Image (cartoon, rainbow, N blue to C red):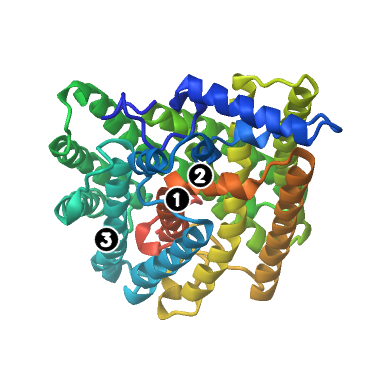
Amino acid sequence: MRLNLHKEKKEGSDNLDDFPPPIIADVALDLGNQSISRRSSSRRLSFTSFTDAYELPRRLSDRMSLSSLVSFTESHQIPRSLSLASFIFITSVGTALLCLLAFIVIPHSNALEDHDAGRILWWQCVAACSGCFGLFQAFTIRHTLELFVIDSSTSIGMFGTFCFWASYAIGYFLGYAGVQYMWLYPAPFGVFIGHLMGILLLLPTIFFVARSHLQKEEVFEDMIKQILWLVASMAFLTLMHSVTIVMASFVGQTTGGVQFLGAPALAMWRYFSGMALSQIYNNIDEHSKFLGYYVCWLITGIYTVMIIGGSENELFGVFVFLVNIAESISQTSFIDKVTKAQREIQTHSHALDNSVKRSLRWLVVSELGQVMIPVFYIICWFGISLSPSGAGFAGIGVNALGSFTPKNEQVFATNIAVWFGLEFASIIAIHFYIRKQMSISLLDHAAGILQRYGLYMALWGVFSMNFAFCVLMISCGVDVSFRFGW
């Protein structure tokens, strides 16, 4: 369970363990009896009533009075929940707004054209990253603390948010600007050094702000552990971004059959990094384990789209789709086998139910990423490319730092559109297959996930998408060729 303030009061529960055993037994028995009586001919149980724990509060209404149900829902109200429509809206507007402010309103130029003049252009990267991204990071950290660490009934407020912003901005400035003047301009991978310095300075600020909202002293040690794991997750994501962009650049520069090997290589990296990050999230909150896979899908998906768009072989996107659909089919097959086995023996295993729920969550977060990433990437890419700041981005306006512009923008857009069309069609097919064969709705599970983690997922979606373009800024100095030929 959450290691924070409410060990005896678990709010926003999405696990069957969070509800009193007598209630589960009674409801499960009633639902099972109703399902058997309705489907005695096929002798199939309504499996969703056991795997979809998000539906329990609604189903409990049959056994509760109206007043007790109102009290139940109010005491377990999940803060800042989002519907699927609002999740898509917030992610879309946030991505476009952050891209506009950080990359278009703030001017960017090619610092490599004039090394002497380039030294004074450090402010471009600092203004975009510590200013715009720092402010966005501050709101993300605020919501993260309210979601995982402090009492969700309290709010950190604007002063705490400003402290997060100031700490990150100062740390980023010292890390990036300091390195570039002590070393050279632009500093190779300076954006990651600045980001890590920002995280380091955020640590004491996060501690004091969270400590001021602590209402129970007995969970002080748990709060410390959660904060350390949160900071560890941020540092791991910085490492993952740096490794992924290097892998993507290497794959993008290859041709022929070698390039096709990049798709399973990125998939393996996504799998293992997702396992590592999910374990970190599990130490923060055991119900948030799937968020590790979601964030990894975002990061690897963004750089995969970069490769697909720049590939001269139109079939590369199709091959990437086949790799992704193989993973989805594997998860779907597991769900199908477990549900059929439990229906045949007319019983349910709590352990298997949780395994099925994990697979369903994996499908939901992976499909969300596959739908959002190509659309938002195209919007941001062409927005930057058509703006005066385009010349300041490697791989968009100029060939530099190991990133290359597409030889044909029409082919670039077509490759991504074909991949998106295949992924979207597969999502629809999987959704209807699971709904027909297993009586499980992925949309219902998506709604349950977004009810608790919707805003958090939207914030990370916006940040990850734009951070991928941040590392393409020439002033950031991310030379993925490792030649450092300034």
Residue at position x 25%, y 37% in the image: 150
Expressed as whole percent of the image width and height from the top left, the position of residue 296 reads 52, 42
Quarter occupied by the C terminus: bottom left
Circle 3 residue = 126
Q: How far separated are the C-alphas under marks 1 and 2?
A: 7 Å
Mark 1 vs mark 3, foreground winner is 1
Expressed as whole percent of the image width and height from the top left, the position of residue 48 reads 65, 36
* For marks 1 and 3 on the same chain, the one whose residue lies earlier in the sequence: 3
Rendered position, 270 above or below 131: above
Is residue 344 visible in the rendered structure shown here? yes
Give the crowd class for mark 3: few <14, some 14-19, many >=20 residues within 10 Å: many
* For marks 1 and 2 on the same chain, the one whose residue lies earlier in the sequence: 2
- For mark 1, give the secondary structure: helix
Circle 1 residue = 454
Circle 2 residue = 449
Three-letter amino acid code of the residue under disc 1 = Gly
Is residue 277 visible in the rendered structure shown here? no
Q: Is residue 325 left or right of residue 131?
A: right
Give the crowd class for mark 1: few <14, some 14-19, many >=20 residues within 10 Å: many
Q: Is residue 224 left or right of residue 31?
A: left
Three-letter amino acid code of the residue under disc 2 = Ile
Q: Are marks 1 and 3 in contact (CB under 8 Å)?
A: no
Q: Are marks 1 and 2 in contact (CB under 8 Å)?
A: yes
Quarter occupied by the N terminus: top left
Residue placed furthest toward the right: 41
Three-letter amino acid code of the residue under disc 3 = Val
Residue at position x 70%, y 69% in the image: 414
Disc number placed over residue 335 in the picture, else none: none
Q: Is residue 295 left or right of residue 329?
A: left
